Amino acid sequence: MKNRLSWLVLLIQYCSITITFCLPNNSSVDMVTQWECTAHDQCPSTKACVQGVCSDPCVGLCGDNTTCTVHLHLPACACYLGHTGNPFIGCYPQRLEKFAIEGTVEKNSLAKKKFYTIHLQPYDKANWTEGFITCERNNSRLASIHNVEEMENAVNTILQDGVLNDKYWTSGIRSNLTLGFFIWASSGKHVPLNLSFWSYTYPDSSPSSNCLCLEKKTNNTYLLYNYQCSYKRSVLCEY
């Protein structure tokens, strides 16, 4: 897990273009090398600049029973539809009543009551992938919201935080650019288009608006919108 997170963090950062090496007399010199890229935006949108090469950032990133999509150079793992688990480690069919976690057997986590939390400092912001990492590092997952009750709990968590930021990333991500549907990356479940807390006229059909966030409207009401995954937002986690 640690290696995968380190790899993901590397992909989010821009690449270095200078290599420094030591000479026999312990002096150093900068060696300029021919690089294919020096920044992500010099690569196709489905690739990332990794050590000077435009590479597929999905290689070796996700666990079993997962998909990996790249939006504007940022990779995102998600469980297959009908699966749940941690997509960076592996997902399992939701119909299983029990599953193994780190050598122990526990009840299906979807049967447990869900709680929401906010780990970032009030004015810290993250893109979608960084938000996913933030939740994982705090032993939680990027939020999924399956029904009105969970939506009320999520909004109450935001209101109780007292900061009332306008936008919070959730784990919702577009699963297939052709079919256009979204899934919750933290549970693998489909995001129905008839949810009562979608904002009017959303989801946006723009091919670059692939990640879902809660956005504040009037009277402390939050609704679901889809935006570019590279945008900086606050982060809502669940456990």
Image: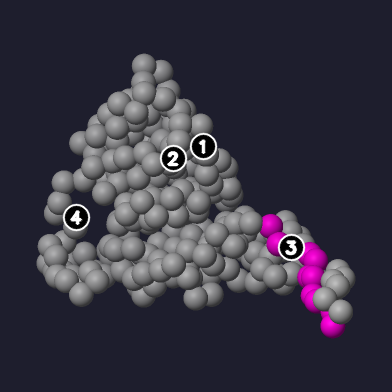
Helix or strand or loop: what does disc 3 sit on?
loop
Magenta stretch, overall SS? loop
Q: Is residue 8 above or below residue 206?
A: below
Q: Is residue 175 magenta?
A: no
Work out whether residue 184 can be spotted.
no
* Residue furthest to the bottom: 24
Helix or strand or loop: what does disc 4 sit on?
helix
Task: Give the mark nearer the N terminus: 3 vs 4.
Answer: 3
Q: Residue under label 1, please give it.
A: 124
Most foreground residue, 225 or 202: 225
Q: Is residue 159 above or below residue 11?
A: above
Q: Residue at x 36, y 69 (%)?
A: 89
Q: Residues within 10 Å of mark 2 (few under 14, many from 20)?
A: some
Q: CA distance from mark 3 to mark 1?
A: 25 Å
Q: Residue at x 65, y 64 (%)?
A: 48
Q: Residue under label 3, please give it.
A: 16
Q: CA distance from mark 2 to mark 3?
A: 27 Å
On the picture, is 183 further left or further right than 47? left
Which quadrant of the structure image shows residue 90?
Answer: bottom left
Q: CA distance from mark 1 to mark 4?
A: 29 Å
Q: Residue under label 2, please give it.
A: 120
> What segment is highlighted magenta in the picture?
14-24
Instruction: Name the residue type under label 3.
Output: Ser
Instruction: Name the residue type under label 1.
Output: Asp
- Whether pointer 2 and pointer 1 mark residues with C-beta atoms closer than 8 Å, the reply is yes
Instruction: Name the residue type under label 4.
Output: Leu
Q: Is residue 163 above or below residue 8?
A: above
x, y percentage for residue 30?
86, 69
Helix or strand or loop: what does disc 1 sit on?
loop
x, y percentage for residue 149?
20, 36
Q: Residue under label 4, please give it.
A: 110
- Whether pointer 2 and pointer 3 mark residues with C-beta atoms closer than 8 Å, the reply is no
